[in-house]
Every structure is written in C-alpha cells, then in structure tokens.
Amino acid sequence: MTVLNTEIHIVTLLFVILETLMFSHQLVFYLQKPKEKKRKYYLILLFLLIIYNIAGGLFPDENLPLSVVFQYILAYGAGFSMGAYFPYYFYQSYNITHLEFHAKYGVLIFLILPFIIFFCILYPLGLDLMTVIYVGMIIPFAYAFYMVYNILWGIRQRYKNRKASFDAILSYIAVAPWALMPLLAYLQVTQLTEVLFTNGGFLIITFLFFRNMIEENRKDLETLDLIQTKNEEEIFAIRCKNLGLTKRETEICQLVRDGYIYKEIGDTMNISERTVNKHIQNIFKKAGSNNKLDLLNKISRRVKSA
C-alpha cells in the first residue's frame, strides 16, 4: 500500500515518521550535552536511516522530475552509505579498536569503491541495471558478511568482562540484516520486505542506546548521592567499581592517579612491570580510554559532572 501518490509504502512512511521524531528528540538532548559521543553517532545513524528509507521508498518513480538512472543511484547510494557507516558506528560508540581499519578504509575500498565504479560510472554509461547489481554486489556482499562477524567478535571481546553477551547478541541481530542487502537486491524483493529487514535493526539499536543511557544516568545519580556523604577516596573507588574494575585494578588505578610509573607500581605491589602493563591495558578497555591521562580525566569528569 503506497501513500501520498508516491511509490513509498505506508510501513516505510511510518518508520520515517518514527525515526524523525526520535531524531528530533535526541537532537535536543545532544545540543544540551554536545560532548556525549554515543548520542552523536546515534543521531548520524538515525539520519542515514531516514535518508535511506526516503530514497528507497520514493525511487524509482517515473513521475518524478529525475532520470530513472539517477534515482537508482540515489536509492542504492543511500543503502551503501548506511552499510558503510555501521563499522564506524561500532568503532566509535563501542570503542572496538580492531575495527579502525575497516571503519576508516575497509568500507571505502570494499563498499564505496564498487558502488562508484558500477553504479556511478558503468551504469550511467549504459551497463544494464541487473548486470550492475549481479556483478557490482559481489565484493560488497562478501565484505558485508565479513564485517558482521567482525563487529560481533569485537563487541564480545570489548565487553567480555561485563554484561557482554546480551549487548553482543542484540547488536549482532541489529546489523546482520544489512549483510543480506545485496542478496535482497539480487532477489528484487518488495519494498515492504526490505524496509522490515533493515529497520528492525534500528529498533534493537535504539533499545540498546536507551538501556545504556538509563544505566549511565542511574550511576550518575548514585554518584550525586554519594558525593554528599563520601570522601574523595571512597568516591574514586566507587567510580572505579562502576567501570567494572577489579580490586587489584582499582589499586593500580589509584597509584597511577598518584603519579607512580609502571615500575614503581610493580615494586609497590610486588608484581612485575609486565603484569602492571597487562592490568593497565584491561583498565583502558573497561574505561574506554587510550592513555592514563584520558582514564583519569574520565573518572574525574564522572565525579564532577555528578
């Protein structure tokens, strides 16, 4: 069932309305707290999904004042852009460092480049659409499955010492349908089937986003209560616990805060410098930090912001 005298399906329109409302709502919160990284990348994800739904729903339509070739390029381009953003989204939002190459370069080589060659160059030059789809989708099809596996593996590794399996499985379900996009293009499925496949992931990621935001807000409220009754050392220990640090890791974190170098920490705790470094790397992963200064700034900022 199409609406507004266009090719857009009513279900697609409903998703566009829902996602636009969600985008507007979250944009207000982001403008209030522009340093919230996860909200920023979530907003980008929503924006791309809205564009994808509009382009995929409207195009192709011979009644529109655009060439059919250009409409197909826009429709498939929106889909490729959405698929290319997923590795970057998980790399930035979930701090999955091993996705860095794919987020910055892999998607450009294996997704964007085939799109440019086949859809933006060969298709306008006269290559028929079915050949463009069947040949041009081969590399993106294989790469999409490879990336779905890598994202799932990365999430499980990143959160293996926390409540990882739940987030990992849901995140996997969210991105897995995008690996089927080239297959759906091969099969020429209906717009309804395609929009349900691709937008189901939006609902899952939105659930995870709000779940994590609620958990972070709850911890901040707990800190707000504690800061009025606890001294600085107790608050520091509690914040370390909220990050998932063990007792030993908390002790090391305290020594780092006090200015000890790794060798001095090892001597103080009767462990090797190599063991200290291993603990530090685990602390960085749990805190989502890349260095000691960033780690201590995050802990301090959490306390102050509360």
Image (cartoon, grey):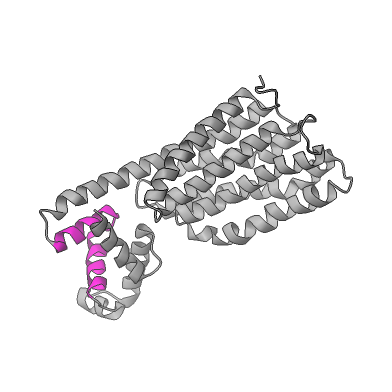
The percent coordinates of residue 17 (x first, y second) are 53, 30
Q: Nearer the viewer, residue 64 or 151?
A: 64
User: Is residue 166 visible to the viewer in this orientation of the structure?
Assistant: no
Quadrant of residue 180 in the image?
Answer: top right
Q: Nearer the viewer, residue 214 or 270?
A: 214
The percent coordinates of residue 134 (x first, y second) are 79, 42
Quadrant of residue 243 in the image?
Answer: bottom left
**Image point (35%, 44%), residue name:** 213
Asked if residue 160 is positioned above or below residue 214 in the image, the reply reads below
Asked if residue 183 is positioned above or below residue 86 in the image, the reply reads above
**Please, what is the dominant secondary structure of the magenta stretch?**
helix
**Image point (22%, 60%), residue name:** 247
Residue furthest top as drawn: 1
Q: Nearer the viewer, residue 2 or 132?
A: 2
The percent coordinates of residue 122 (x first, y second) are 84, 50
The percent coordinates of residue 221 (x first, y second) are 22, 46
Asked if residue 106 is positioned above or below residue 140 in the image, the reply reads below
**Image point (20%, 61%), residue name:** 236
In this image, 72 relative to 230: left or right? right
How many numbered badges does the structure rendering display? 0
Q: Is residue 231 magenta?
A: no
In this image, 302 relative to 94: left or right? left
User: Is residue 296 visible to the viewer in this orientation of the structure?
Assistant: yes
In this image, 32 relative to 187: left or right? left
Quadrant of residue 101 in the image?
Answer: bottom right
Residue furthest left as drawn: 229
Residue furthest front as drawn: 65
Query: In this picture, which residue range is highlighted in magenta?
Result: 232-258
**Image point (78%, 50%), residue name:** 120
Q: Nearer the viewer, residue 199 or 17?
A: 17
| Placement of the N terminus among the 4 image quadrants | top right
